[in-house]
Image (cartoon, rainbow, N blue to C red):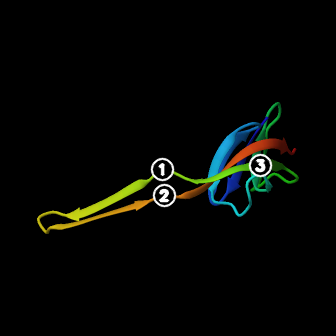
Amino acid sequence: MYAVIKTSGHQFRVQQGDQIRVNRLGGKVGEKVSFDEVLLVGGSNVAVGAPTVKSARVEGVIKEHTHNEKVTIFKYMRRKNYKRTRGHKQAVTVVEINTITGA
């Protein structure tokens, strides 16, 4: 069984046992987290929501809080001696999916 969930403006296709990296969540390591915005539940029969599947839920456990790899932003203007380098590391939470319940 699989599901498509929406969290923090991103959509993820998840199965039981998957680990996903979502934008930083406000829980502690080891706490349970549930995703109620389930857009699709698949398996032997597929349930597509309009926009979400009612009574569907995906639950998981927070494994760690970390950062993504660094993204380097470099901009310049030719012949003007103008160069700027910036970096960004997005704060993320690793969530392990435990159960998928729904239609």
Residue for badge 1: 69
Picture disc at residue 40: none
Under tag 2, what secondary structure? loop
Q: Position of residue 47 (x, y in %)?
A: 80, 43
Residue occupying the point 30% across, 59% down: 74
- Which of the image's four quarters has the C terminus? top right
- The amino acid type of the residue labelled 1 equals Glu
Mark 1 or mark 3: whose residue is earlier in sequence: 3
Under tag 3, what secondary structure? strand
How would you rate the neighbour count of disc 3 (Cα within 10 Å): few for under 14, some for 14-19, many for 20 or more? some
Q: Note whether 44 is above or below 33 in the view shown.
A: above
Check contact, mark 2 vs mark 1: CB within 8 A: yes
Residue for badge 2: 89
- Which of the image's four quarters has the N terminus? top right
- The amino acid type of the residue labelled 2 equals Lys
Q: Note whether 14 is above or below 53 in the view shown.
A: above
Residue occupying the point 68% across, 60% down: 25
Residue for badge 3: 61
Q: CA distance from mark 1 to mark 3?
A: 22 Å
